[in-house]
Structure formats: structure tokens, C-alpha cells
Image (cartoon, helix red, strand yellow):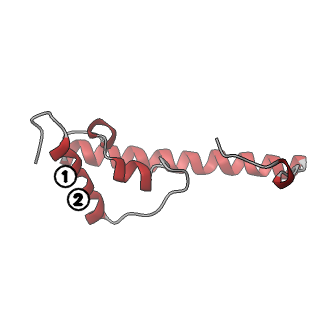
Amino acid sequence: MPSFKKSNLSKLTNRELTNQLKNLAKYNNLAQGARDKIISHCLIVYGVEPGEVDNDVFIDLCDGGCGASSPMSAKQFDNSMKSALKKWSWPHGL
């Protein structure tokens, strides 16, 4: 949970709070849809999900593992999955 100083806090109006709650739900649903498609892709291509091989590069950059997310190219993602698979001890390596 983020650390906030009391002096940096502000009270939202009911309207602002409602809008922020709607935004949170909307973007969480979009993120879940993207996550589902990425996981499906991974199961077909690599045989595992990113979390199963502890792909920290993906988790930290794109999946909010370190708070704010950063984009990743398909090539970067592929390299991160292959690297995670190599470190993984099961015989699934590519």
C-alpha cells in the first residue's frame, strides 16, 4: 500500500469518488482481459503461465508487481519468458 503523508491527502467529493471507483473498475476489467489473452498465448507457446516460471521481468514491468506499469515489446516478452523457462527447474525449457 502506498505511503501517504497526511498533508498530501485530499478528500474527494462524492462525484469525484464515484468517478474514480468507476475508472478503477473499468481499467481493472481491461487489464484482466489483456492478462487472460497473454496467459492463453503463453500456454500455447510456452506451455506455462508467466507466474508459473516466476517471470519477474513481466510481472514487475507490465503486471503491476512494482506499482506503476511500463510497456514491453513482444520480443522483450518472449526473451523474458525464455529466460524464466531456463531458470525454471522443470523439463519444459525451450
Name the side, left or right, on which 73 lies relative to 88: right
Q: Quadrant of residue 62?
A: bottom left
Which of 45/76 is in front? Answer: 76
The residue carrying pointer 1 sits among few (fewer than 14), some (14 to 19) or many (20 or more) residues within 10 Å by Cα, namely: some
Q: Residues within 10 Å of mark 2 (few under 14, many from 20)?
A: few
Residue located farthest toward the top when viewing the structure as drawn:
90
- SS at mark 2? helix
Image coordinates for residue 26, horizontal then vertical, percent: 62, 49
Which image quarter is the N terminus in? top right
Query: How many numbered circles does the render carry?
Result: 2
Q: Which residue is at 75% across, 48% downward?
A: 4
Name the kind of residue labelled 2 in the image: Asn
- Residue 8 at x, y = what percent? 82, 55
User: Which residue is located at x 27 percent, y 48 percent?
Assistant: 41
Q: Is residue 3 left or right of residue 67?
A: right
Where residue 46 sits in the image (x, y, percent)?
19, 45
* Residue occupying the point 31% across, 46% down: 55
The circle drawn on residue 58 is none
The Cα–Cα distance between marks 1 and 2, rounded to whole angstroms, is 5 Å
Picture coordinates of residue 64 (x, y %)?
Answer: 50, 49
> Which image quadrant for residue 78?
bottom left
Please report contact status of discs 1 and 2: CB closer than 8 Å, yes or no: yes
Q: Amino acid at mark 1?
A: Lys
Residue topped by disc 2: 79
Q: Which residue is mark 1?
A: 82
Q: Residue at x 84, y 47 (%)?
A: 6
Q: Identify the element where label 1 is drawn.
A: helix
